[in-house]
Image (spheres, rainbow, N blue to C red):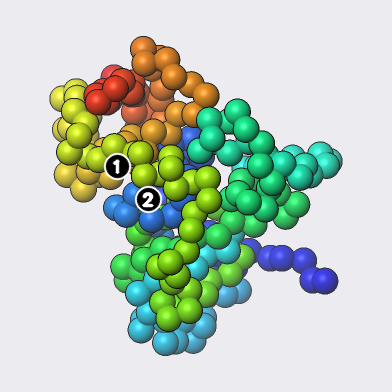
Amino acid sequence: MSELKPIAHIETDFPTKFGVPRQSGLVAGLKGRIVFEPEYRDPEALRGLDGFSHIWLLWDFSEARRDGMKWRPTVRPPRLGGNKRVGVFATRSPYRPNNIGLSSVRILSINLHTPDGPVIEVEGADLMSGTPIFDIKPYLAFTDSHPDATGGFTEETFNSNPSLESITFTFNSILTKTFDPEHLKTLKEILLSDPRPHYHDDADRVYALEFAGKEVKFRIRPNQIEAWIE
């Protein structure tokens, strides 16, 4: 079998993995820029892609590599608070026999002629900046969409997530002046998804994430999220 070779990488507002949405599409406003490796910068490779609204990305869990460690058949999903083990193939955990991730993202634009060659602008990404991409395939609604599909153990926890309208956000003036309205809305959605480890429930604990070139500190309490830049 030939070795997988990255064809591109993605540029996003997340230089580290902490804070990155746990699934693609959860934070629709989170944008990304797919830049191809030099040998794949042929515009002909993207011919016809402009007729599709979404694409699948197959990518490398590059930050989850544990060289030399044997894979385990069970993992502790964050959705279950990290307290219950389920089979690795019943999860999308990065700790798998092969470190391959799968994401569905919306195409915003395709720019064939840039200083970096052809570039695909997308939104709804769940990848940290620099993540290697192995392949890109068009999303086909007539076969890829299954409205009657069930979500196993994820359904109860996902359906219990609060809405933007039910949470009070308190942002300090430095933060609101630093980010434009689009980034502020995206930040709210990121914090609403609660990027904290699910086994952390200390309402007074302060966390920090790197977002759009700034360190954002935040605290999550019932019905209230505070965030600030110092």
Using the image as rendered, state which of residue 3 and residue 191 is in the foreground: 191
Tell me if 180 is positioned left or right of 137 in this view: left
Q: Residue at x 68, y 65 (%)?
A: 5
Q: Amino acid at mark 1?
A: Glu
Tell me if 92 is positioned left or right of 140 in this view: right
Q: Secondary structure at mark 1?
A: helix
Q: Amino acid at mark 2?
A: Leu
Tell me if 86 is positioned left or right of 213 in this view: right
Q: Residue at x 57, y 75 (%)?
A: 40
The image shows residue 180, relative to residue 125, as above or below, that is above
What residue sits right under mark 2 in the picture? Answer: 26
Q: Residue at x 61, y 65 (%)?
A: 134
What residue sits right under mark 1 in the picture? Answer: 189
The N terminus lies in quadrant? bottom right
Mark pair 2, 1: CA separation: 8 Å
Res 112 seen here = no
Res 223 seen here = yes
